[in-house]
Image: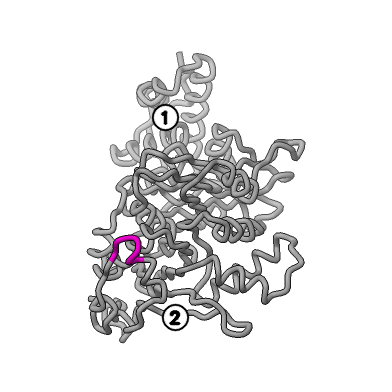
Amino acid sequence: MIDAGTQGEAALKGPDLEKLRGYLTQQIIRYLEEHKLPPDKRKEAVQGLLEQAFAQTKLVLPRGDKAALFREISNDLLGYGPIQPLLDDPDVSEVMVNGPRHIFVERKGKVERAPVTFQDDAHVLRIIDRIVLPLGRRVDPDNPTVDARLPDGSRVNAVVPPVAIDGPSLTIRKFAKERLGVADLIKFGSITEPMAQFLEACVKAHLNIVISGGTGSGKTTLLNIMSSFIPDKERIVTIEDAAELQLQQEHVVRLETKPPNVDGKGGMDIRGLVRNSLRMRPDRIVVGEVRGGEAFDMLQAMNTGHDGSLTTLHSNAPRDALARIETMVLMAGMDLPIKVVRQQIASAVDLIVQQTRLTDGSRKVTYVTEVGGMEGDTVILTDVFRFEQTGVSPEGKVQGELRATGIRPMFMARLKAAGFDLGAQIFMPGSGA
C-alpha cells in the first residue's frame, strides 16, 4: 500500500505543485521497485497508483491541472519525460534539447521552440540514461558523448558535461513510420518525373552515386528511395553508424558500427565494416554516410568491381563534395599526391546528387551532376539537372524550377547497355517540370 502524504484542502500552485509532483513520483517509484512489475504491466499500474496516492493526500486540484500533472508524471516514469509528447507528435521530425530550459523541435521543415522544459540538469541526465542504458550504451564525464538507435529506429545523440558547457544536450531524429517512395518526392516537388526516371536508370545501370547535402536535408530519405531501385536479385550490404535504411529487398545484410567497451576494445567502425563487406560477395555496397578514412576504402571498392555503390556525405554543393572526399581520403593516412586522389575519385564516382533544405523548410534535389573524368589537375563536373531559384513568395515560399540543363551525360552508353533508352527529350531545357 502507498503511504499517505500531508493532508490539505487548498488547490496548489507553483512550488507546492512541484512538491506534490515529487511526492507522487517517489511513491510510485517506491512501489514499482518493491513489486518489480514487468514493463508491459507498468503503464496500467501507474495510472491506478497515481489516483490512489493523490486521493490519500486529500488535496484539491482543478481537473485539467490534475490530468496534466498525472500525464507529466507518467511520461517521466514510463517515457522520456517532458519530450515524450513531442516524440508522439507525428508532425515533429526532430527534437533538440539544449540544456533543461531550451528545447526545440523541427516541425514540417521549420525549427521552433517547444513549450516544455526539464526541471534541471539532473532531470535531463535521468532521461538520457533511460534512453541509452537499455541500448547497452553509457554516457558520463569520462564518456561524454553517445550515438545510439532507439528500438523504433530513431537516432539519438547525447552530449553531457564537461563537453556540453550549458548542460546536457540531447538530439533525437525521429524514425519516419511511413516509408516515402519516389512518387512522394515528385508530389512534394523534391524531384521531377524526368529526374526520377534518370536516377532510377543510373541505379539499375550500376553507376556509383554519392548523395551530398547538409544536416537535415533529407539525404537518408533520398538514399532509401534510390536504394529501392536496386533489383531484388542482387545482394546488398548496408553499412551505417545507426541503422536507418529501410531496404525492402530480400537479399540484404545490414551492418552497424559498434563502440568499444570500457577497456577501449571490441569496437568496429565504418571503415572496418567497409573492408569486411568486400569479403561478403556484395553486388552493392550502401554506406549510410562517409565522414572519415572509410572514404578511401569506399573508392577502392568502387574502382575494383563493386559498381553500383551508394553513399551520402555532408556537403553544400557538388564541387564541395569532391573536396570533402579528398579530405576524407587523406584522413585514411595514405600519403598520396592530391592529383592521384582526384584521379581515384574521378574514376570511381559517376554521379553526385545534391540534396538541399531550402529557407522555407522544403527539401529539394538541387543538382544532379555527372563526374566526367579529369582535365589537368581538375575533376570535371557537368550538371545534368539543377534547381534554378527565381524568388521568394510573400508567404516565404521559395520559388523556382527544377529543370534539365540540355547536356546529355557521357555515360549514356552504359544506361543504354543496361536497357534504358531515355530519349533526348528528358535532357532538353525546360523538360524538368
Query: What is the x, y in percent for residue 118?
Result: 51, 47
Q: Residue 8 got which mark?
A: 1
Give the residue at x 64% y 64%.
Answer: 328
Q: Which residue has dot 2 on it?
A: 382
Toward the viewer: 155 or 332?
332
Image-quadrant location for residue 261? top right
Label 2: few (<14), some or many (≥20) within 10 Å?
A: some
Tell me the amino acid under the disc marked 2: Thr
Instruction: From this view, report whether residue 246 is shown above or below residue 395.
Output: above
Q: Are marks 1 and 2 in contact (CB under 8 Å)?
A: no
Give the residue at x 31% y 83%.
Answer: 392
Distance in Å between CA atoms under marks 1 and 2: 76 Å
Earlier along the polypeptide chain: callout 1 or callout 2? Answer: 1
Image-quadrant location for residue 38? top left
Query: What is the x, y in percent for residue 135?
Result: 55, 35
Q: Is residue 14 visible?
A: no
Quadrant into which the C terminus falls: bottom left
Left of 380 or right of it: where is 276? right
Query: What is the x, y in percent for residue 370?
Result: 44, 74
What is the secondary structure assignment of the residue under circle 1? Answer: loop
Left of 150 or right of it: where is 427? left
Q: Is residue 416 rendered magenta in the image?
A: yes
Tell me the amino acid under the disc marked 1: Gly
Label 1: few (<14), some or many (≥20) within 10 Å?
A: few
Quadrant into which the N terminus falls: top left
Q: Is residue 322 rendered magenta in the image?
A: no
Toward the viewer: 319 or 101?
319
Instruction: From this view, report whether residue 102 is shown above or below residue 347.
Output: above
Q: Over which residues does the magenta segment extend? A: 415-420
